[in-house]
Amino acid sequence: MCWSATADLVAGTAIAGVGVACVARAQRTRDLPLAALPVLLGAHQLVEAWVWHVGGGTGPAVVAWTVIAFPLLAVWVPVGVLCAAPRQARRRLVLPLACGVATAVALVHALTTHSVRAEIRGHTVGYVLGLSHGSLVVAGYLLATVGSLLLSGDRRLRGFGFLAGVGALVCYALWRLEFVSTWCAFAAVCSVVMLGWAGRRRPRY
């Protein structure tokens, strides 16, 4: 999330561009899902630019934003980490992947049984979704995404996981205060980290 349609548009274009570079620099086929993560994050920002443009509401852009943010990322990140991780780390990564799948199922159920609504709140966008057991779903989401990175067995990915956890807390705090949405800046930093990871020489495990 960014603080305006223009900011989302600029950030989304830049992040997607970095994502294309990440994919081009990936040295192994199984690194591609994780290397492509900035492409997905960039597309996410571009979708939100349209949400700003239409003034929120319940249209297709809002649904697309929610699908990417919630069920898709809950599975994409742990799958990408599992594919890229060294062999000795893969067994422990089954747990965050299972949490991601369970979380995605709960979120898809919520999306198919409730309408999601976007609300423009000053310099932020709030997304309202009727979700039961919200705290449990959030815990599962964080375990799937941040947890998989921390358990990856790769030093740079562990650092990325720590950055993701801290960044998520800061972005959430600022969003709750309805001060300004900063997710786009955080996504930009993450995309640069992923660019360094994708181009790094690594052993053939």
Image (tube, rainbow, N blue to C red):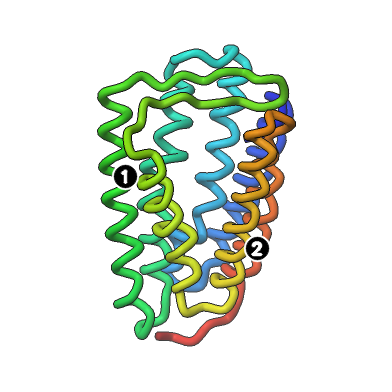
Residue topped by disc 2: 193
Q: The residue under label 1 is which amino acid type?
A: Ala
Residue at image location 65% in from the left, 44% down from the top = 171
Of the 4 image quadrants, the one containing the C terminus is: bottom left
Q: Is residue 197 left or right of residue 79?
A: right
- The residue under the point 55% across, 16% down is 56
Q: Residues within 10 Å of mark 2 (few under 14, many from 20)?
A: some
Residue at 39% in and 39% down: 134
Q: Is residue 7 left or right of residue 31?
A: right
Q: Secondary structure at mark 1?
A: helix
Q: Which mark is on residue 104?
A: 1
Q: Dividing the picture into quarters, in which one does residue 81 lie?
A: bottom left
Of badges 1 and 2, the one in the foreground is 1
Which is more N-terminal, label 2 or label 1?
A: 1
Of 107 and 197, nearer the camera is 107
**Secondary structure category for the residue under label 2:** helix
Reply above or below: 164 against 25: above
Q: Which mark is residue 94?
A: none
Distance from the alpha carbon under mark 1 to that under mark 2: 26 Å
Where residue 188 appears, x then y in whole percent? 68, 49
Question: Residue 131's image quarter?
Answer: top left
Looking at the rendering, in which quadrant would you find the N terminus?
Answer: top right
Identify which amino acid the numbered label 2 is placed on.
Val
Instruction: Estimate the x, y position of residue 108 in percent, counting from the top left.
Output: 29, 35
Place residue 145 in its image quadrant.
Answer: bottom left
Image location of residue 199, percent across then percent down: 61, 71
| Identity of the residue drawn at 26% across and 42% down | 105
Label 1 with label 2: CB-CB less than 8 Å = no
Q: Residues within 10 Å of mark 1 (few under 14, many from 20)?
A: many
Q: How many marks?
A: 2
